[in-house]
Amino acid sequence: MHQFLLLSPEVANARASGKPIVALESTIISHGMPYPQNVQTAREVEQIIRDGGAVPATIAVIGGKICIGLTPEQLELLGNSPEALKVSRRDLAYVLSQNKLGATTVAATMICAQLAGISVFVTGGIGGVHRGAETSFDISADLQELAQTNVAVVCAGVKSILDIGLTLEYLETQGVPVVSVGQEGFPAFFTRESGYHADFRLDTPAEQASFIRTKWALGLNGGVVVAAPVPESDAMPKEEIDGITLQALQEAEENGVTGKKVTPFLLARIKTLTAGRSLATNIALVKNNARVGAALARALLEHPIT
């Protein structure tokens, strides 16, 4: 066991008994949704994973430890603590060494999951290349993490606030395969289609697991993006969300919002401009990803990586 890891009793028991485990990030709790929907959604997502035959491991930095699996009290703490820091690769050592409260992003959750021997991670959407990155150089650390850390990331694609085309180009350059579930197209978080195609379509957990096992058995390090589109009944119209996204991006620029504050600002503005419908879509897609991730974790366990 790594010196900085602290496993919850549920996760420790799962590890000892050989049950499949699914990692979950915590920035979606601290920075991605308002209270109390954030905590309620986190609990419901964990239960969906349990119902899917796997064990949830929500990850956060608390008390100088990387907590793999959180108690209800810790979920409440993250969901209701403005001082919780958003932790990526750059920040992990600082937050641990200074005993700060930290919520892990996609990149940091991947690092922590790999340290804990967890191969499947469920999130809402991955970060990517921000619009205007040719001048701002604003590219999420998630993409570089995907290039080097052996964790499969189940998501609903890339948020429409980002430059999806450049994000996919970056992933291709880094050798990160993008797999779409149930369709050829790559999803765009709030909508099922982004206008771009995924690299491969693999619809079943068995196919996905076989692909991932083969990749890592070949020594091809790095993650895999498993993109599951939001269910049709919960998706937002593409034209509507595109227009609202452009308005939110303009407001962010006018207000001088930069860096880590951009995504929370945009998601909050989109929620307001859609009268809360975007939050409902966000919750629905995370729950759907949890079902896909639990099934994938089970499939990987049934046929272990060699």
Image (cartoon, rainbow, N blue to C red):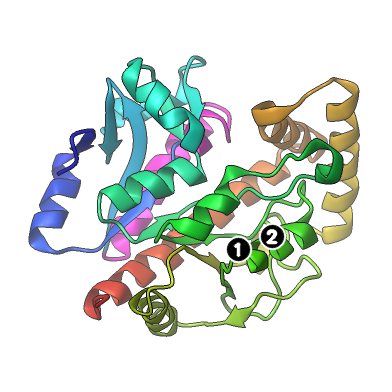
Say which amino acid is labelled 2: Tyr
Q: Is residue 145 left or right of residue 184?
A: left
The crowding category of the residue bearing disc 2, from other C-alpha atoms within 10 Å (few below 14, some 14 to 19, many at least 20), is some
Asked if labels 1 and 2 touch by Cβ distance under 8 angstroms, the answer is yes
Q: Residues in magenta?
A: 27-53
Occupied quadrant, residue 228: bottom right
Q: What is the number of the mark on residue 170? A: 2
Magenta stretch, overall SS: helix
Say which amino acid is labelled 1: Gln
Q: Position of residue 65 (x, y in %)?
A: 26, 28
Image height of 182 relative to 188, above or below: below
Occupied quadrant, residue 97: top left
Q: Which residue is mark 1?
A: 174
Q: Position of residue 91 (x, y in %)?
A: 47, 28
Q: Is residue 127 left or right of residue 43?
A: right
State whether residue 77 appears in this view: no
> 214 or 47: nearer the eye?
214
Image height of 165 relative to 271, above or below: below
